[in-house]
Amino acid sequence: MQGGYANRGLSRYVPYLLLAPALIYLMIFIGYPMIEGIKLVFYQNGGFSLETVHRAINNYYFWPAVKDTLGLAAIILPTQLLLALILALTVNKVFKGRNVALTLLLIPMTLSDIAAGLIWYSMLSPSGFMNKLLLNLGLIHAPIQLFGYQFHTREFMVIVFVELWRSTVTIFVIVLAGLQMISQEYLEAAEVFGAGYWTKLRRIIIPLLKPSIQTALLLRTIYAFSIFGIVWVLVGRDVPVLAGEAYYQVTQIKDYGVGAFYALLIAVMSLAIGVIYLRITRAEYLEVKR
């Protein structure tokens, strides 16, 4: 009896022991750097100071970086979700060549953002593959210029295109996994009662996909606000983004406080959007709805 009570007492601590490695990891690799970043931004000369914040906000590239970072996220995230949902619904069906299509869709996932940027820059540059192809076909008479400070809008759209090509697959994989976990009994029961495809999609599939969509959006939001590699390779500072400016301030200017401010701003923006996602994509269960 005493051994049973002892085992029951120890079992209460098992969840905490299982969580301990994750908590230790978060404290060392996220918590500690964040505290040091806050100190770099707000603690100077032995006390609280907003000098670093003032210096960062008045930087020439700050507001363009905020605008372009938010603009890229506002375009890329909903577009990626829509494309991923369409692709997942398509690939989830059984058809000839399904495995080949799935393999082709997963290829961008194997590339880093730097590699993807280099590939598309070599293809879209004035002397790249796309311009040579169009010239040889006689569709254009001079290379299309997509890169350069005077072509800011074009550069912005190139970044959007390359990021959609490279990272939509991340959301696609998560949504496809969620689709395959939905029991066919729900859909078959809906068909018995005369529900069409769009009714099943709106009333059954999307509500049950909300946890998967929530996870995918949270991950992609973090990456969207910290987008850097593709932008830096394709256009440099022609299209400034917060992560790129943080890198520039730390490596070139050696202003660690301003770099830390940009990093904290990215974290705050990601956290704010994440809270909104958690509220909007809260799971709805069809069995019990209170």
Image (spheres, rainbow, N blue to C red):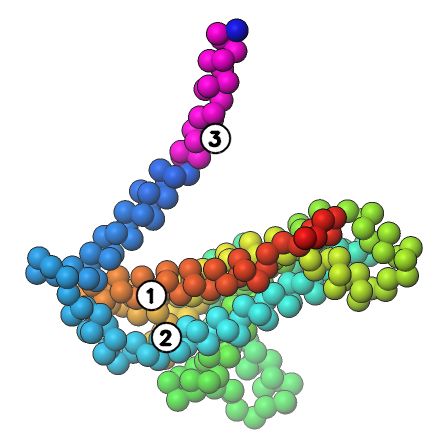
Q: Work out which residue is located at the far front of the displayed protein and give it.
A: 290
Callout 2–callout 1 Cβ contact below 8 Å: yes
| Mark closer to the chain start, 3 or 1 | 3
Give x and y (percent) for residue 203. 75, 61
Which amino acid lies under the numbered mark 1 shown in the image of this protein?
A: Leu
Q: Secondary structure at mark 1?
A: helix
Give x and y (percent) for residue 178. 67, 51
Q: Secondary structure at mark 3?
A: helix
Q: Nearer the viewer, mark 3 or mark 1?
A: 3
Q: Nearer the viewer, residue 152 or 210?
A: 210
Q: Which residue is mark 1?
A: 265
Q: Is residue 17 magenta?
A: yes
Give x and y (percent) for residue 72. 47, 73
Whole-Å distance between the Cαs marked 2 and 3?
A: 41 Å
> In the displayed structure, would residue 38 be above or below residue 184?
below
Q: Which residue is mark 2?
A: 66
Q: Which residue is mark 3?
A: 15
> In the displayed structure, would residue 37 be above or below residue 13?
below
Which amino acid lies under the numbered mark 2 shown in the image of this protein?
A: Val
Q: Which residues are magenta?
A: 2-21
Can residue 162 be seen in this snapshot? no
Residue at (46, 85) in percent of width and height:
153
> In the displayed structure, would residue 275 be above or below residue 78?
above
Q: Nearer the viewer, residue 277 or 178?
A: 277
| Mark closer to the chain start, 2 or 1 | 2
- Numbered mark located on residue 32 in the image: none
Whole-Å distance between the Cαs marked 2 and 1?
A: 9 Å
Residue at (43, 63) in percent of width and height:
272
Relative placement, left or right, of 260 versus 43 is: right
